[in-house]
Image (tube, helix red, strand yellow):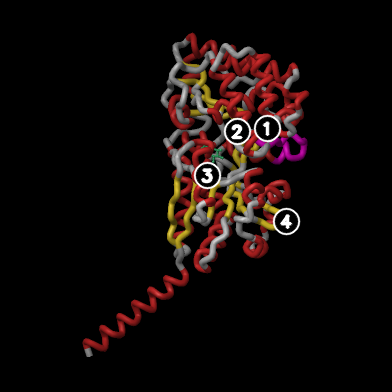
């Protein structure tokens, strides 16, 4: 009797294991979300996948902006050991797809109706030759300026500056009051994030598009570009001597801790403020970078899915793609990440005023034509030109012996990189 029972339960156990073996699969996800707000966001995706019975294999490669992650991804794919999904965005999705290594997601995209849930401009970035190969997560706005509310008050700055002239007046007051005006991390993608907001503010969206999307040589060597580089150089004198190499989230921490007044950074910085319990509108303020209120530099995070052989792993991958575009994930992830949902028709009730402003401006600029891709965040040009431009921009930022005229020549030359 006892033996029979034991045998029965052993059989039941192995049946359970078998079902689990068929249904559950490892899903390895390469990402670079390692800062406070970012880590909280990615945990939400992990939870959803675990609830579906899959095993989340976290493949986090630290490094803001994702350059390190991109390098690691290349070596994994080249050695025939691709992860199921990797944080890849913009034109790089097309480059990976043209190598023939990405999976076709059309079955899940059709059953989940992605074509009717995504604006066509977004869907086009996720597709290669008409088929979905990546799933979009969010929309980040890059042209933000963040500030510490108490510090502005202590420095006698009444309101967030609206023009660059007003900005430097405010920055002088902050300096005079004994604080650092601009929290900056001297890494090439952060330098370029600052420059792209300046170019947008000084030149407007049409000029930005000519210079940083079309890479038009005339725009890149124009007076407007010269003016932008002058503002950029001036900005440097408002940063502290310890900025070289600093991670972006440590710069955000300087604003939180009342050491620095402003930071120019995309709204993943808001995720960082929120993760630290800071309240928007009270502890910290958000405003479009000076001169850019009517424009929007967008940066969409997305996951490219790589071809896998195992059927269980393919199922897990399809579940991941469906989860990413699901309402539950789009809400909870973006509440933590600082971005807004990319899926249309989402209820924004739980989002804060910065996110609501981003959602409104996203819709308005999509109509007005002032919605432009962020070059610093890999949305605008191919990786080779972006890399060369980042180097030229940071060289100019770091070496004050390079004149504005020479900096401009170097940047224009870098833009021609194929
Ligand atoms: C990504 C964000 C990320 C930020 C800092 C951006 O390029 O789009 O998701 O939080 O870099 O790493």
Categorize mark 1 by other alpha carbons within 10 Å: few (<14), some (14-19), many (20+): some
- Above or below — where is 228 with respect to 86? above
Measured from the top left, where is residue 395 in percent x and y? 57, 21
Q: Dividing the image into four equal quarters, which quarter contains ligand 1?
A: top right
Disc 3 element: helix
Pointer 1 residue: 417
Q: Earlier in the sequence, mark 3 or mark 4?
A: 4
* Viewer-side label of 1, 4: 1
Pointer 3 residue: 335
Distance between mark 3 and mark 1 Cα atoms: 38 Å
Q: Earlier in the sequence, mark 1 or mark 4?
A: 4
The reply to whether discs 2 and 1 touch (Cβ–Cβ < 8 Å) is yes
Categorize mark 2 by other alpha carbons within 10 Å: few (<14), some (14-19), many (20+): some
* Viewer-side label of 3, 2: 2
Distance between mark 2 and mark 1 Cα atoms: 9 Å
Q: Nearer the viewer, residue 195 or 155?
A: 195
The reply to whether discs 1 and 4 touch (Cβ–Cβ < 8 Å) is no
Pointer 4 residue: 130
Q: Which residues are magenta?
A: 363-374
């Amino acid at each position: 009797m006892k033996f029979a029972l034991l045998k029965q339960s052993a059989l039941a156990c192995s049946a359970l294991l078998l079902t689990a073996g068929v249904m559950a699969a490892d899903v390895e996800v390469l990402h670079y979300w390692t800062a406070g707000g970012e880590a909280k966001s990615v945990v939400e995706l992990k939870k959803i996948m675990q609830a579906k019975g899959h095993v989340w294999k976290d493949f986090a490669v630290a490094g803001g902006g994702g350059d390190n992650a991109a390098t690691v991804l290349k070596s994994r794919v080249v050695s025939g050991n691709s992860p199921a999904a990797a944080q890849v965005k913009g034109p790089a999705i097309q480059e990976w797809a043209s190598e023939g290594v990405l999976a076709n997601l059309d079955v899940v995209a059709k059953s989940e109706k992605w074509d009717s849930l995504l604006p066509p401009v977004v869907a086009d970035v996720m597709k290669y030759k008409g088929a979905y190969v990546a799933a979009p997560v969010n929309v980040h706005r890059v042209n933000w300026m963040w500030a510490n509310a108490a510090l502005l008050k202590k420095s006698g700055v009444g309101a967030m500056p609206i023009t660059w002239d007003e900005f430097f007046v405010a920055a002088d007051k902050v300096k005079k009051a004994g604080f650092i005006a601009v929290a900056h991390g001297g890494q090439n993608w952060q330098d370029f994030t600052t420059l792209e907001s300046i170019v947008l503010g000084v030149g407007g969206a049409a000029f930005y598009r000519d210079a940083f999307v079309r890479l038009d040589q005339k725009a890149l060597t124009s007076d407007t570009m010269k003016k932008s580089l002058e503002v950029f150089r001036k900005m440097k004198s408002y940063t502290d001597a310890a900025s070289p190499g600093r991670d972006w989230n440590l710069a955000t921490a300087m604003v939180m801790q009342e050491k620095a007044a402003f930071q120019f950074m995309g709204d993943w910085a808001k995720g960082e403020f929120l993760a630290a319990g800071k309240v928007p509108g009270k502890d910290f303020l958000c405003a479009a970078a000076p001169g850019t209120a009517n424009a929007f530099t967008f940066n969409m995070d997305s996951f490219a899915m790589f071809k896998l052989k195992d059927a269980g792993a393919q199922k897990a991958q399809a579940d991941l793609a469906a989860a990413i575009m699901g309402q539950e994930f789009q809400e909870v992830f973006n509440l933590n990440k600082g971005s807004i949902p990319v899926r249309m028709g989402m209820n924004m009730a739980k989002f804060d005023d910065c996110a609501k402003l981003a959602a409104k401006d996203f819709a308005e600029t999509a109509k007005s034509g002032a919605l432009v891709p962020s070059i610093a965040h890999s949305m605008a040009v191919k990786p080779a030109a972006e890399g060369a431009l980042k180097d030229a921009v940071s060289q100019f930022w770091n070496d004050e012996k390079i004149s504005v005229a020479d900096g401009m020549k170097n940047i224009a030359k870098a833009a021609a990189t194929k």
